[in-house]
Each structure stands twice: as C-alpha cells, then as structure tokens.
Image (cartoon, rainbow, N blue to C red):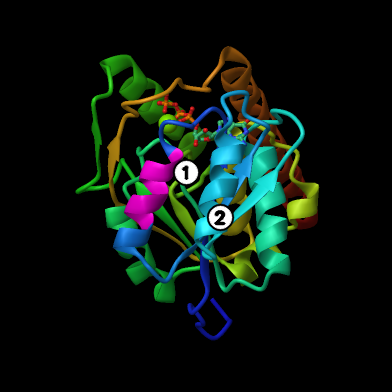
Amino acid sequence: MTEEWRGDRVVMVVPTYNERDNIAWILGRLHDAAPDVDVLVVDDSSPDGTGDLADELALADSRVHVLHRERKGGLGAAYLHGFRWALDAGYDVIGEMDADGSHQPEQLHRLREALPEADLVIGSRWVPGGSVVNWPWHREALSRGGNLYVRLLLGLRVNDATAGYRLFRRQTLEKIELETVRSTGYVFQTDLAVRTSRAGLVVREVPIEFVERIRGDSKMSGAVAVESLRRITGWGARERGAQLRRGVGRGRGAR
Ligand SMILES: Nc1nc2c(ncn2[C@@H]2O[C@H](COP(=O)(O)OP(=O)(O)OP(=O)(O)O)[C@@H](O)[C@H]2O)c(=O)[nH]1
Ligand SMILES: [Mg+2]
C-alpha cells in the first residue's frame, strides 16, 4: 500500500444476465444503504430485457450508468469491460457486486471500512463471522473445496478467493495488468485475487452473510467450472515449475 488514501468516488460494477426481477430491487437497496455510491450495470443483451430496464433506471437517477454488451461473454469479460469504463471515468474505488441479492448492499459499509488498510477488500463467506444462507451442502462443499485447492496449489492466503463482493482501489486495478487477463468466467475472481497478492498488494477479507438468490436462474454452468479447474491447475503447475527451477538454480550455485 503505497498510494495515499482517496475514497471519495465509488462505483459498484454489477454484471447482469437475465436479472429483470432483481435489478431495480438491488439498486434500490444499494442507494438506501449507500446514497453516495454510483453503479455501473454491465448487461450482456439479456433476452429478458434487463438492459432496457437498467436504461430506465439510469434515466431516472444520475448515479446509475449502463454498459450494453452485444452477447453473453461471461462474468469476467463483463467485469473487465466495466473496470475499463470505471477507470476512464476516474473513480477512486471500483467494486463488484452480484445483481441477485447474494451480496447485501446493507453490508457494503463493512468493505468500505476496511479499504483504508487494504488494496483489495473481499467480502468473505469463509472467515469467522462470515456465512451462507440457503445453500445445499454440496454448494458449500464445492466452494470450500475450491478455495482449499486454490490455497494449497497457489499458496494464496485468502479464505474466499472465489467471492465476488469486492472493493478495489483504482491503483490496484492499474497495477495488475488487466489487459493480460484471459479468464472469462467465474475464475476471474480467483485470477484477480492472485494477481493482487502477487503484486505485493494488501488483500483483506471482511465477513459477510451471503444469501442465495431467491429470484431468477443461476448462470453457473459446467463450462464455467471446467474453466476454473483448468486455469487454476495451470497456474499451480507453472508456479511449481518456477519453484523447481529456482531450487535447481540455487543447487548449482552452491556447488
Ligand atoms: N454481464 C454478464 N453477467 C453475468 C454473466 N454470468 C453471470 N452474470 C451475472 O453475474 C452475477 C453472478 O451470477 P449468478 O448466476 O448469480 O452466479 P452464482 O451466484 O454463482 O449462482 P446462484 O447461486 O444461482 O446465484 C449475477 O448478477 C449474474 O446476472 C455473463 O455472462 N455476463
Ligand atoms: Mg448468484
């Protein structure tokens, strides 16, 4: 953490795909809880008309902005697009939040309060005080197992690296070379946590209560899970390879 703290202008990037039943509800809750925060909805031409509804909300409220993308390109791709827009627009703090109510706007203050001491704050399910409401046991097992895999394989000291309730300082996004990110699905979250930590920046987790969606359909798919496993294993193999080469190099030097 080298930069002086400036937290004045905050934007939450909210990716949407078929969230018509949720978008007005969640933005209303956000602005009740945090009236000073702007929103960027990034919609991938949702067939249910979420994008048009977001445009109407933006017309009625100058804090709301909308990016329309041509087709469904994955969560990571939507965030990358949104981050570029937010950086260009000059925001000091750029956040991530789902549209389905899993990330409670009423808990955003917890993340904001931690940001003066961090470069990235993650709202975490798997730290003391964190929890999940309405998840079947197999979802919890998958999330905990996935995070354990990430911790063991990549040596990342984050308990919930896959979580998507976050605040980045703009300087963090400027430092982690977003133009080289290739993760398009949910593994994007792990990718950015790893990049932030490897850049020597401070990642802090604060407990949140994650509430499973009550309206609309999940966009989680087999393809998304396969991308996660493939990329994380690839990063892990590369990391172990580099460790091995460093070890061999040291061995030679000693002789
Ligand atoms: N723009 C865009 N948004 C997406 C895409 N995939 C998912 N989203 C949004 O990303 C957020 C998280 O997706 P969810 O479907 O809730 O994923 P999830 O939380 O793992 O699944 P649930 O447990 O069913 O909620 C939601 O706001 C989605 O609308 C995508 O390809 N493009
Ligand atoms: Mg969800």
Judged from the image, the secondary structure of the residue bearing numbered disc 2 is: helix
Q: Which of marks 1 and 2 is nearer the N terminus?
A: 2
Mark 1 beta carbon near ligand 1 (under 8 Å)? yes
**Vertical order, 126 against 121 (above or below):** above
Nearer the observer, 198 or 178: 178
Dominant SS in magenta: helix
The residue that mark 1 highlights is 164
Q: Which residue is drawn at 62% across and 29% down?
A: 46
Nearer the observer, 4 or 45: 45
User: From which residue to which does the magenta span run?
Assistant: 23-30
The tag on residue 58 is 2
Question: Mark 1, mark 2: which one is toward the viewer?
Answer: 2
The reply to whether the magenta stretch includes residue 91 is no
Q: Position of residue 136 (x, y in %)?
A: 27, 17
Q: In this view, does 66 lie to the left or right of 140?
A: right
**Vertical order, 242 against 232 (above or below):** below
Residue type at tag 2 = Ala
The reply to whether the magenta stretch includes residue 24 is yes
Q: Position of residue 149 (x, y in %)?
A: 48, 30
Residue type at tag 1 = Gly
Judged from the image, the secondary structure of the residue bearing numbered disc 1 is: loop
